[in-house]
Image (cartoon, helix red, strand yellow):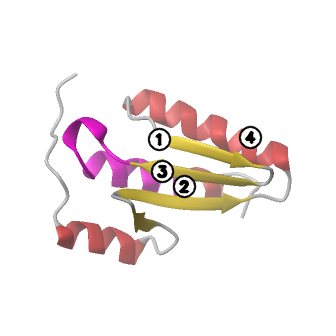
Amino acid sequence: MAYDRTLLTTEALQTFLSEHSEWKHEGGMLRRTYEFPAFLEGIAFVERVARAAEAADHHPDIDIRWRKVTLALVTHDAGGLTWRDTKLAAEADGLFGSGAGK
């Protein structure tokens, strides 16, 4: 599938981060840790994110630690952050808000 591999500008990245303050730019990736009241709620969130990621053909690194789930996003084949990363990050935030974990 062909898609735009244009890297985010510094301004676009800063705008995203100012609008999504829980996300951090670390190690060239967007990262956020979500915390849930129970382990299985975190697992349910991972499944929702996995379905969204598969539909977008854009897959985050996912780290599960008991009640905490960390997502890390980067467009590897573009060599950095693109709109695909910010789009999936914002979608993950919506999926978190729509689930039990807050």
Q: CA distance from mark 4 to mark 1?
A: 15 Å
Question: Residue placed at 56% from the left, 34% from the top?
Answer: 50
Q: Which residue is mark 1?
A: 60
Q: Quadrant of the C terminus?
A: bottom right
| Magenta part of the chain | 74-93
Disc with the residue nearer the chain's start (3 vs 4)? 4
Q: What residue did someone put label 3 on?
A: 72
- Which-is-in-front pick, marks 3 and 2? 3
Question: Toward the viewer: 76 or 45?
Answer: 76
Precedes in sequence: disc 4 or disc 1: 4
Contact, mark 3 vs mark 2 (Cβ under 8 Å): no
The amino acid at mark 2 is Gly
Q: Is residue 71 above or below residue 52?
A: below
Q: Is residue 81 magenta?
A: yes
Q: What x and y, as percent, mark residue 52?
A: 49, 36
Q: CA distance from mark 1 to mark 2?
A: 16 Å
* Quadrant (top left, top right, bottom left, bottom right) of the N terminus: top left
The amino acid type of the residue labelled 4 equals: Ile
Residue plotted at (80% across, 50% down): 66
Q: Secondary structure at mark 2?
A: helix
> Residue 94, labelled with which disc?
2
Badge 3 element: strand
Residue ID for mark 4: 43
